Amino acid sequence: MQIPAARQSRPRHFLSHLFAKGSKSVRPGGRGMLSAVFLAGALLLVIAAVRAGQVSFIPNGMLFPNSNGLSQTYSANGKGIDLTGPFFQNLGTNGRSCGTCHQPSDGMSVSASHIQQRFAQTQGEDPIFRTVDGSNCNHSIDVSALEGRVAAYSLLRTRGLFRIAIGVPANADYRVVSVQNPYGCNETDTISMYRRPLPAANLRFLSAVMTDGRESTPITGTQKIVFATYPGSLMSDLAHQAMDATNGHAQGDGSRPTAAEQQEIVNFEMSLTTAQAIGNGIGRLDAQGAKGGPIALATQPFFISVNSSINPLVPQFEPPGGVATPGDGHFNQAIFDLFDAWASHPDASPRAAVARGQAIFNSRPINISGVAGINDDISAGGLVQGGVASLTGTCGTCHDTPSVGNHSFPTPLNIGTSDPDPYDSSVNMGGLDIRYLPSITVCRVDPITGGPTTECKTTTDLGQAMIDGKFDHVGKIKGPVLRGLSARGPYFHNGSAQSLLDVVRFYEGRFGLVLTPQQESDLVAFLSSL
């Protein structure tokens, strides 16, 4: 992507000019909103220039539009994002780079709406559209004509989903007895699952790499990320992931990235911080004492198990825990304090709505039940012997990293986003449509006969069980970082929540959380401001 200076000059001058404009306050109402509309339109032109390779550098502070306002992605290395490094280079054989699916304009992930735009602009020829994992299935398809590409890439276009095909572990204590895949990938030895790409920013807060943790386990030659080995284990896992992603998604031959390129990719990723910076009708998210946006996030303290919600309850779990210092034994349920300063604003103020939503996230009780990794028996990965039928918590029980919102220790959970409702298999446990996903049934194997027992589970994604082969781990996945949500919809690992309101309503349906329409709106306002 190296560009001659003559080609760079005009786009870079325009981009720098926009950066100067974007650094000013955008206020709700009147002339400020007209300026925001103009800025958003101009930024769309800049995004197109970036994708076309007409610029090679994005300065820190650049604003990118989304449906809820504007986001920013900052790099701590230099003064912005260098688009010429190995992260943005084609290191494989199919035209893809890491940047194909991890875009600065999309919080270093990629939104379904922007994927659809790329399909329309290129007639489905953009490198993101490759049958290795971009098509719903990789056999019995024809992508030679536009009509075939429309059908083959429907999940990628509408839900932002990639097909993740993983072989069933040879030592699995379960048997896959049935796969009903709407797109024809019905194999029972290699299971096709469908997942959103995780952001390649805010990575220093990770306690596991990849949705199913497969890049943070000795099973795959990587390391579990724990307090004693962080950040070295995280950086080693990210380097391994860079090679695996190139060999898989980009169909590389194993020669690249070189060790030096892997390190450069990891350094680049670890330097990135992304967050929503400006909200529609709200203005700057760091105004009037608030601490939103990526700048404050870039200096947020972190260690593995920080503010663990579990360690104070069960000290042998998630060590060392603690808030101010490792092992201090405390847990602060106020996971976010970004918008405390707005709590005193008039009730009708959009900023007050954000503060109210933050309070709901931090303090509204939730009856947690049926969650594998919490409620099940300790032998299956739960908290106590015999399990616990229910546990009163909050959003922060699972999203406990301060100001970030992922789980600060590698504790995979199954909250039911992949699992069909027992009374209506067309929706998941929170009532969201999953008819577009496969139905996978697995049964525990009898250790004596080697045959399947009658103890079975049906899901759309086997999660951690596809890595370690354990029936008890079916459906368990890690929780995501919550910053920058507005830039990267749809939500949940399988794209089942088309909007942040869908996310809220999932929790209402799944855990019996009762919210008024105003409280739903406030919680959405908060989540969209992260």
Image (cartoon, rainbow, N blue to C red):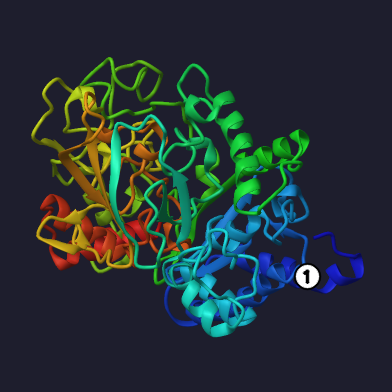
Residue placed most toward the observer, 4 or 239: 239
The N terminus sits in image quarter: bottom right
The amino acid at mark 1 is Gln
Asked if residue 27 lies left or right of residue 246, the reply is: left
Residue placed most toward the observer, 209 or 356: 209
Q: Quadrant of residue 93?
A: bottom right
Q: Position of residue 184 (x, y in %)?
A: 40, 65
Q: Residue at x 20, y 40 (%)?
A: 371
Q: Residue at x 56, y 48 (%)?
A: 200
Residue placed most toward the observer, 185 or 365: 185
Residue 450 vertical position relative to residue 168 in the rendered view, above or below: above
Asked if residue 364 lies left or right of residue 267, the reply is: left
Q: Residue at x 50, y 79 (%)?
A: 150
In this rendering, does residue 429 appear at all?
no
In this rendering, does residue 210 appear at all?
yes
Q: Quadrant of residue 462?
A: top left
Q: Residue furthest front?
A: 449
Give the tally of numbered discs: 1
Secondary structure under the numbered disc 1 in the rendered image:
loop
Q: Would you call the spot at circle 1 few (<14 residues within 10 Å), some (14-19), or many (20 or more)? A: many
Residue 22 vertical position relative to residue 193 in the rendered view, above or below: below
The C terminus sits in image quarter: bottom left
Q: Residue at x 57, y 77 (%)?
A: 119
Q: Position of residue 405 (x, y in %)?
A: 37, 43
Q: Position of residue 505 (x, y in %)?
A: 21, 61
Asked if residue 105 lies left or right of residue 368, the reply is: right
Residue 94 vertical position relative to residue 66 in the rendered view, above or below: above
Q: Position of residue 9 (x, y in %)?
A: 85, 70
Residue placed most toward the observer, 304 or 299: 304
Which residue in the protein does label 1 denote? 54
